Image: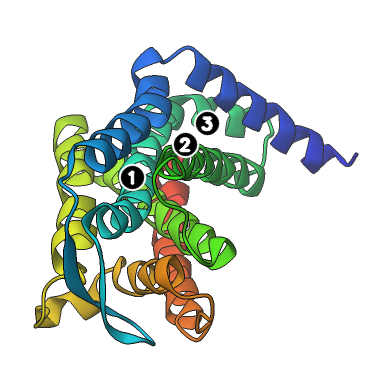
Amino acid sequence: MTASGRRFRTTFEMGLREYARTPVLLGLVLFLPAYFVGIFIHVLPTSSLPIYVPGSGRMTVQTVEIYGALLVPLMGALIGGIAGLFVMLSATDADARLSIAGVGPVSLLAARFTLIVVAGLAAVGVSLAVLATAFVPEAIVPFVLASLVLAVTYGLLGTLAGLLVSRLAGVYLMLIAPMLDVFFFQNPMIDDGHWLSTLLPGHFPTAVAVDAAFTRSVAWDPFGPILAWLGVAGGFAALAYYRALRT
């Protein structure tokens, strides 16, 4: 293993140990998705409602199914954003010392971003496991990919919040923004969506997730804008991170 690889592994393992020493964060990553998804899919009444499914048009589905399909990307975005926020809040001072000790900024940044991916994977995995007790999406792979990319995108936005605003403001922002984005602006039960919905990071991932939840043939074209949003969020997060290291 190269020297940079060893530095990345060391920094990543330090981050995992910090996760383990933060019970609140562990509870958010593992308990909150299970609680929210479990409550919704087992408490909602048995009924049907019409929704718009990208690529298939109007469909009538069970209430539990549509809320379940929305909750997995929502939990990914919510947990990813909070994880990104806490990673940066707890890592800024430590990373500055590691940088002085010789760990390159690329290794530091890669390790921190990988921690966000791990948190997103855990949130999506737990949410999907609970959802599977009542409903299984038709196309699992694109459904998971869309939910995970949204989790990482909001994780990167969470790192920006951790670097640019106070802790309390960042927590409120990462709690409210994904909820408004995925659950309200991207809701397929709304006939005429607000024009702002197409500009938000949850637009294309949620469209793919809803499409994959109810159809087997999912269009992969939206992954272009999805990756573009991910690249923009990652670029701004990286710039803010390098600036924080220098100061």
- Where does the N terminus fall, quadrant-wise? top right
Closer to us: mark 3 or mark 1?
1
- Tag 2 near tag 1, CB within 8 Å: yes
| Residue 244, image quadrant | top left
From where the camera sits, is residue 247 visible?
no
Distance of mark 2 from mark 1, alpha carbons?
Answer: 9 Å
Closer to us: mark 2 or mark 3?
2
Q: Which residue is mark 3?
A: 95
Instruction: Describe the element under mark 2 as helix, strand or loop.
Output: helix
Please tell me how crowded label 2 is: few (under 14), some (14-19), or many (20+) other residues with Cα within 10 Å: many
Taking 162 as reference, is 65 above or below it? below
Please tell me how crowded label 1 is: few (under 14), some (14-19), or many (20+) other residues with Cα within 10 Å: many
Horizontal arrangement in the rendering, residue 219 relative to residue 201 (left or right): right
Distance of mark 2 from mark 3, alpha carbons?
Answer: 30 Å
> Residue 55 appears at what percent x and percent y?
39, 87
Q: Name the kind of residue labelled 1 in the image.
A: Met
Instruction: Describe the element under mark 3 as helix, strand or loop.
Output: helix
From where the camera sits, is residue 43 visible?
yes
Q: Which mark, residue 75? A: 1
- Where does the C terminus fall, quadrant-wise? top left
> Residue 45 appears at what percent x and percent y?
15, 46
